[in-house]
Image: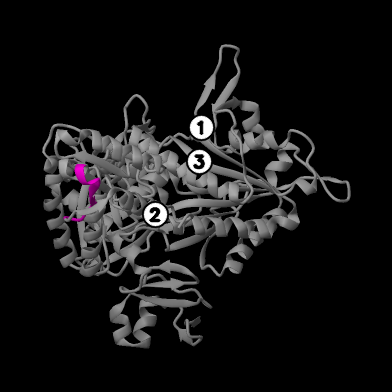
Amino acid sequence: MIHVSLPDGATRTLSDDATASGLASDISKSLAKRTVAAVVNGIMSDLAEPLPDGATVELIGRDDPRALELIRHDLAHVLAEAVQNIWPETKTAIGPAIEHGFYYDFDRDTPFTPEDLPVIEKKMREIIAARTPFTCEVWTRDQAAAHFEEAGETWKLALLDAIPEGEPVKIYRQGDWLDLCRGPHMRHTGDVGAAFKLTHVAGAYWRGDAKNPMLSRIYGIAFADKEALDAHEKMMAEAEKRDHRRLGREMDFFHFEEVAPGSVFWHPRGWRLFQTLIGYMRDRQEEVGYVEVNSPDIMDRALWETSGHWQNYRENMFLAQTQDDRDYALKPMNCPGHMLIYGQGVKSYRDLPLKIAEFGKVHRYEPSGALHGLLRVRSFTQDDAHIYSTPDQLDEECLKVNNLILSIYRDFGFEDVHVKLSTRPENRIGSDESWDRSEDALRKALDTAGLEYTIFGGEGAFYGPKLEYVLRDAIGRDWQCGTLQVDFNLPERFGTTYVASSGEKLPPVMLHRALFGSLERFTGILIEHHAGHLPLWLAPVQIVVATVTGAADNYAEEVTQTLKRAGLRVETDLRNEKIGYKVREHALKKIPIQIAVGAREAEERTVSVRRHGQKENKTMKLEGAVNMLVEGAKSPRQS
């Protein structure tokens, strides 16, 4: 007999071969009917898996949020079975659950098309309706290799080779169809439900490496119920309307070229928005004692070896070799350059904390398939800063950065912010003592600020733990932006010191901090959050002055110059076009304010003001309009 514990502290005595399924039946028939999986000693498990003696067991229903990943994983298997039912010659690769759904990669001579998706989905629903049980079998490596070799499943053979020695080789069946899989799965195909949809097809390199063959990938979305599926589809439709790539073209902000993949070609209006963001951040940083610097874009390999990037980050760096056989790298991060700036001259404890900031252009290699407008680029600008402090100042500086980040996000309309604490990874540098101190400082900052946060074990950088600030936008999507990292290691690697009050030379603690993160990415997020309707203080063109008739051209120019002298960003439209045409064109570009002037306005020294999204104009004296617009264009820090 074995004994297991339940979440409420109760214990059960079961037979030696007892399973979670049997446990559920032993408790009640209704519980057994709604249970689809179990958490055994903290690990998700099949219901048919034998329970170990002394285990803590939690029974999971289909409506449990933790079951959603199982639903999506099971659907990937159902998708693969459906495809091989329709096209038996197709070979399978991998099919994981992902955020919002699932995908499966296939090897097929003819890539899938969107027209194939309804056919596949129909077959999937037939498989689901059959409620075929998922069963797990443990094979020997030789058995699995022989089966997949006979079936011509070369990608499964590669996956089999990647399973570590000593780890069981699990095969999951659903009727006659089977797959190599670690599991777990629910009871049967019917448990996945009907709340799913195949969305699109794409090419995908095996293992994400462009040197490998291209496979054909089918994506799907899946949720626990139809209401959640409908809500997601509605959100995605809204996201498509807000896509910053489309809005960027319509608003004439930027474009991309194949000659520079992952790099932005900024147009005048987009660059003005970009510089407005930098100006805002520069003001905020100067208010709290940061000094701005600039470091070279390309530096010798020796620097990156000292920092540890060459050993830990080289595959993400752009490298170059000169004719004198020197190896260089375009900087992927600003921190090593800042170390060299800090190292100039002797620093005393009286000089600390020293806050060095840079709007530095950095370059990181991203696979071409991962590039996505402004949101995923290879060349971007960081609002990067490094704070050098004594250990005694560490807790206070972490709290100050945290408060600054949250204040900045509020200014841009982001009130819903979640924080992730990423702790020490397996591949790291530095002592356990320094990692303990670093993680404690970040926890203390969050606790002092009264913030809820999620711990991501093992997800920190190789040199220190970090906080990641995740913004929720207007339609409920999450975006990771700012970061704060504590680093005891880099100053020691560079031999950087300060003179303590005792006269002893000690290494400072280094905080790595980015607030927007990537300015390019933050710009894309802002555009989508506001659906292109940027607040007046942010808009690169705040006002367009358009003429109704050529007789008002001189007055229009006067109005424009008056507004510009008041500090507003204004353009003039004197084209010989009907005013309705001008209004529609500027509305498409989402200019916040349109001012129309004709002969009557010129005579009366008035202007006709229309706000974006409103149908009616408001006629005002020019002086009153200027005062109103100046007040409306103040940033949140000026209001």
Q: Are marks 3 and 1 in contact (CB under 8 Å)?
A: no
What residue is shown at x 71% (from left), y 39% (from top)?
Answer: 493
Q: Which circle's residue, 1 or 2, is located before the other in the chain?
A: 1
Q: Label 1 sits on what residue type?
A: Met
Nearer the viewer's eye, disc 1 or disc 2?
2
Q: Quadrant of residue 65?
A: bottom left
Residue, x 31% and y 58% (percent of image)? 100
Residue position marked by numbered label 2 in the rendering? 631
Front-most of 348 and 80?
348
Percent position of residue 4, x then y? 49, 81
Please identify the residue farthest to the right as the structure is shown: 502
- Tell me, yes or no, whether the two marked residues, 3 and 2, touch with CB atoms within 8 Å: no
Instruction: Tell me what residue is drawn at x 29 percent, y 54 percent.
Output: 102
Mark 3 or mark 2: whose residue is earlier in sequence: 3
**Is the residue 16 above or below the residue 513 in the image?**
below
Queried whether the magenta region covers residue 610, the answer comes back as yes
Count of number-bearing discs: 3
Of residues 621 and 51, the one nearer the viewer is 621
Q: Which is nearer the eye, 90 or 96?
A: 96
- Residue 112: percent from left, percent from top: 18, 42
Q: Position of residue 607 (x, y in %)?
A: 24, 47
Disc on res. 407: none
Kindly report which numbered mark, 3 or 1, lies closer to the viewer in this rendering.
3
Read off the magenta span.
Answer: 603-615
Label 3, residues with CA under 10 Å away: few <14, some 14-19, many ≥20:
many
* Residue with the mark numbered 3: 382
Amino acid marked by disc 3:
Gln
Numbered disc in front, either 3 or 2? 2
